[in-house]
Amino acid sequence: MDNVLVLNADLGPLHWVSLKHAVCMLFREVAVVHEAEPDRLFGIYPKPRILRLVRYVDTRWRHTSGPSWSRSGVLVRDGRMCGYCGDPATSVDHIVPRSRGGGNTWTNTVAACQRCNQRKGDRTPAEAGMRLRTRPVAPTWAAMAKRRFARLAQSAYVG
Ligand SMILES: [Zn+2]
């Protein structure tokens, strides 16, 4: 149900979001209603058709290939879920251990809980008898932005 268009602060169109997400953005005051449906209310707001971000978001990233690797990025990509058991993850595991030449790359790292990370140690998943639940991939900027957005939206509801 992606039916509200989000504009950048300079009025450049960014993406579509659901009405629920749009209301969440209004609630968090990161966006204002740019265009609403006349005489239709959604809660206390006029039912928005187009939102405008309060602060300009740099979109140069749209023209680069993707975000560069980082530990926090791996956790975001994997939704902070352990790639081995699905528990909440707080660390990043190198699938081919660093000590054996495995690099800091998107495809060689996965979010992991402390327990799995320790259990695996300096071994490959096969050696440790552990199976990855998904095959790690290099995320696109859009996917990462969506992940971060989802978390922000969640925290807004909880908070
Ligand atoms: Zn785990």
Image (cartoon, rainbow, N blue to C red):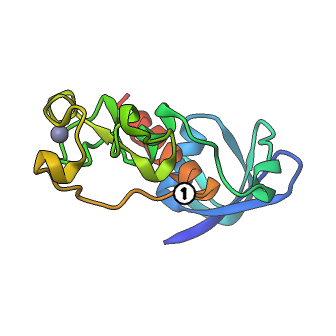
Q: Quadrant of residue 29?
A: top right
Q: Quadrant of residue 15?
A: bottom right
Quadrant (top left/top right/bottom left/bottom right) for the C terminus:
top left
130 lies left or right of 158: left
Q: Dividing the image into four quarters, tell me where ligand 1 lies.
A: top left
Q: Residue 63, can we see it?
A: yes
Res. 85 visible in picture: no
Q: Is residue 107 left or right of residue 121?
A: right
Kind of residue at badge 1: Ala
**Near-viewer residue (58 or 133):** 133
Q: Percent from the top left, x then y, of residue 33?
A: 71, 50
Residue 25 locus on image (x, y percent): 58, 44
Q: Residue at x 63, y 43 (%)?
A: 68
Q: Residue at x 43, y 42 (%)?
A: 102
- Which corner quadrant of the image does residue 142 belong to? bottom right
Q: Residue furthest left?
A: 129
Q: Which residue has dot 1 on it? A: 143
- The residue drawn where x is 21% and y is 27% is 114
Label 1 CA crowd tier, 10 Å (few <14, some 14–19, many 20+): some
Q: Nearer the viewer, residue 60 or 111?
A: 111
Q: Residue at x 52, y 62 (%)?
A: 18
Q: How many marks?
A: 1
- Secondary structure beneath dot 1 equals helix
Q: Is residue 83 above or below residue 159?
A: below
Furthest toward the right, the residue is 10
Q: Nearer the viewer, residue 154 or 37?
A: 154
Would residue 79 be found to the left or right of residue 27 on screen? left
Q: Relative to residue 151, is residue 43 depicted above or below? A: below
Q: What is the x, y in percent for residue 59?
A: 79, 49
Image check: 73 left or right of 133? right
* Residue 89 percent location from the top left of the image: 27, 34
